């Protein structure tokens, strides 16, 4: 009857809505201390976006079925009307694994001045050589995928500097959501949490001086 058809239509609409949202997750990555935490905290304040507040490293699993299992657990924890937004810096080295798991996903690849990255990582106990090596590798990857429409490379200096308004406007168009300065919240801590059974190695918060004038912000 008519009621049954309407109920079936509503169920089908909800199914499509969840499928559409989950089919286009947003993954944030980049060399550690390049602004990934700032980006995550900002996007989690945007209507229609949701996800864990810390990195999960779900894509490091080499076997696709394992990655899909972890990703589904993450998606199951958010509203069916929301798109997943997830940050794991290490995923910059596993971009193809992201696309293999979700072909329509979008990636925000954060980059930052090498001197600030090295200084920040060094303050966390990393060596200059190791920090610089990771930065170089991530920059090469950013250049390799610079023309890929699924990826947007975002400079930390543009997010916090004079190009902020223009950068957020570009980000809004890329993600098809509204991102403004009202959403911009500096990250002040870094550690990991278990998000439905998916977790990453813990980190300890620390205050880091940067040349960008944000001396106590965790990027």
Image (spheres, grey):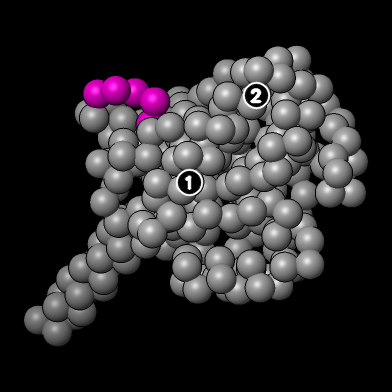
Residue occupied by mark 2: 131
Q: Is residue 62 magenta?
A: yes
Q: Which residues are magenta?
A: 59-63
> Image check: 166 left or right of 123?
left
Q: Nearer the viewer, residue 154 or 184?
A: 154
Kindly give the residue lying farthest to the bottom in the view shown.
Answer: 2
Q: Where residue 28 sits in the image (x, y, percent)?
A: 52, 46
Give the overall secondary structure of the magenta segment. loop
Q: Earlier in the sequence, mark 1 or mark 2?
A: 2
* Res. 120 image quadrant: top right
Point out which mark residue 2 bears.
none
Point out which mark residue 142 bears.
1
The alpha-carbon separation of the residues under discs 1 and 2 comes to: 17 Å
Q: Nearer the viewer, residue 200 or 5?
A: 200
As helix, strand or loop, the secondary structure at mark 2 comes to helix
State which quarter of the image contains the N terminus.
Answer: bottom left
Q: Where residue 108 sits in the image (x, y, percent)?
A: 50, 52
| Residue at x 59%, y 32% (from the top left corner) | 135
* Res. 210 image quadrant: top right
Above or below: residue 104 compared with residue 115: below
């Amino acid at each position: 009857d008519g009621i049954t058809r309407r109920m079936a239509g509503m169920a089908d609409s909800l199914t499509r809505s969840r499928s559409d949202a989950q089919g286009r997750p947003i993954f944030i990555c980049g060399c550690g201390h390049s602004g990934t935490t700032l980006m995550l905290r900002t996007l989690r304040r945007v209507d229609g976006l949701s996800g864990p507040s810390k990195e999960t490293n779900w894509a490091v699993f080499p076997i696709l079925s394992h990655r899909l299992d972890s990703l589904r657990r993450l998606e199951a924890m958010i509203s069916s009307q929301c798109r997943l937004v997830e940050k794991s810096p290490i995923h910059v080295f596993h971009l193809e694994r992201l696309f293999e798991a979700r072909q329509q996903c979008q990636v925000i690849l954060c980059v930052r001045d090498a001197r600030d990255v090295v200084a920040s990582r060094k303050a966390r106990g990393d060596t200059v050589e190791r920090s610089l090596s990771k930065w170089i590798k991530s920059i090469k990857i950013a250049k390799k995928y610079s023309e890929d429409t699924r990826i947007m490379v975002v400079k930390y200096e543009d997010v916090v500097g004079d190009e902020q308004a223009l950068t957020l406007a570009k980000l809004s168009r890329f993600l098809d959501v509204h991102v403004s300065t009202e959403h911009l919240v500096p990250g002040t801590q870094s550690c990991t949490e278990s998000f439905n059974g998916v977790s990453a190695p813990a980190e300890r918060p620390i205050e880091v001086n940067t040349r960008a004038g944000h001396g106590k912000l965790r990027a």
